[in-house]
Image (cartoon, rainbow, N blue to C red):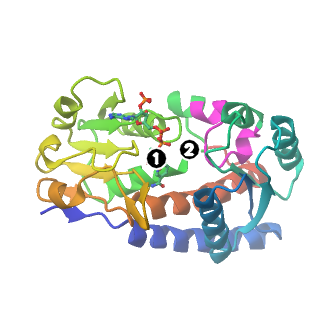
Amino acid sequence: MAEVLDGRALAARIRQAVREEVAAFTERHGLAPCLAAILVGDDPASSLYVQNKAKAAAQVGIRSETFHLPAGTPQEEVLRLVEELNRREDVHGILPQMPLPEPLDPEVVFERLDPRKDVDGLSPDNAGRLALGRPRLVPCTPLGILALLQQTGRSLAGTHAVVVGRSNLVGKPTAHLLLAEHATVTLCHSRTRDLARHTRDADVLVAAVGRPHLVTADMVKPGAVVVDVGITRDGGRVVGDVDFDAVRDVAGWITPVPGGVGPMTVAMLLRNTLRAARIQLEGEDR
Ligand code: NAP
């Protein structure tokens, strides 16, 4: 039976550490790190995420502001807000809540974002740095995935890591982080032929697709570490990409949904906001 990697417990420890560092930062500079969230439209899940992030920020002493723009806000107006927040010296992190409603183009928004305030690591500058092996601000969910993997106490060097999903937000940056840990990385996606052939060979399997129970027990190597990133809402329930009950009998370690990657994403956002504030006020650049 697999050991469950408890994201809630690990996230609580990270938040405690961030709280202490934020207190020291605030004392040094006479101001707290500040996160500005941009929420466009009325998607209930996005509104809830933004509220949860603001609450989590307050708990560690990070100040937050939410800018709620109506659905249908033109791109130019969103960009004007981004530029205003880029200029404000009391704002250290800017988080455009994804997904932005169509026809807004997230790529253009992230291109305009000051990379030193880009706490989700999605600007071309930060994404490029990660790809070059010189990371600065790295996307929060992949950072959370890596921290969970490190909980196993096993080195990733030389392992075969298979990431299913190649988004800029999760799959690609996770692959880069695993590569930096010297794993041999396979990146799968919707055009991958015979997905199970790849996943069955994975020592580390990360599922980031958004299709409930895509990963079944017969697709998992015995003893593998399985990280489930997927979140699909099914009525009041949240369901992952992995058939947890069946895969648990085969894997060595497994993350639950909820209570695995989700809480880690929020903890890493707080850590990235503190890091962004340090980059801006203390010149820390790595
Ligand atoms: P996304 O942008 O929709 O990307 C999904 C990826 O899955 C794409 O690369 C797609 O391939 C691939 N895919 C789709 N069907 C597939 C199949 N049958 N077999 C293999 N690959 C397939 O989603 P995302 O933003 O990366 O998020 C992925 C999941 O993680 C979602 O459920 C999301 O809600 C969740 N998520 C969770 C957290 C958290 O904190 N826990 C954070 C972010 C996201 P193509 O590129 O070929 O289309």
Q: CA distance from mark 1 to mark 2?
A: 8 Å
Tell which of 139 and 131 is nearer to you. 139
Tell which of 131 and 210 is nearer to you. 210
Q: Does 50 appear above or below 163? A: below
Task: Find numbered disc 2 in the image and state the secondary structure of the residue it sits on.
Answer: loop
**What residue is pinned by disc 2?**
138
Q: Quadrant of residue 106?
A: top right
> In what quadrant does ligand 1 lie?
top left
Q: Residue at x 58, y 59 (%)?
A: 45
Tell me the quadrant of the picture where the C terminus can be found: top right
Q: Does 98 appear above or below 260? A: above
Q: Residue at x 87, y 41 (%)?
A: 77
Q: Position of residue 166 (x, y in %)?
A: 43, 32
Mark 1 closeness class: few <14, some 14–19, many ≥20 residues within 10 Å? many
Q: Are marks 1 and 2 in contact (CB under 8 Å)?
A: yes
**What residue is pinned by disc 1?**
142
Q: Is residue 125 magenta?
A: yes
Tell which of 72 and 59 is nearer to you. 72
Q: Residue at x 39, y 67 (%)?
A: 259
Under mark 2, the amino acid is Val
Under mark 1, the amino acid is Pro
Is residue 283 shown left or right of residue 174? right
Q: Position of residue 232 (x, y in %)?
A: 42, 54
Residue situated furthest front in the rendering: 235
Q: Is mark 1 within 8 Å of ligand 1?
A: no
Q: Which residues are magenta?
A: 113-127
Q: Position of residue 55 (x, y in %)?
A: 64, 73
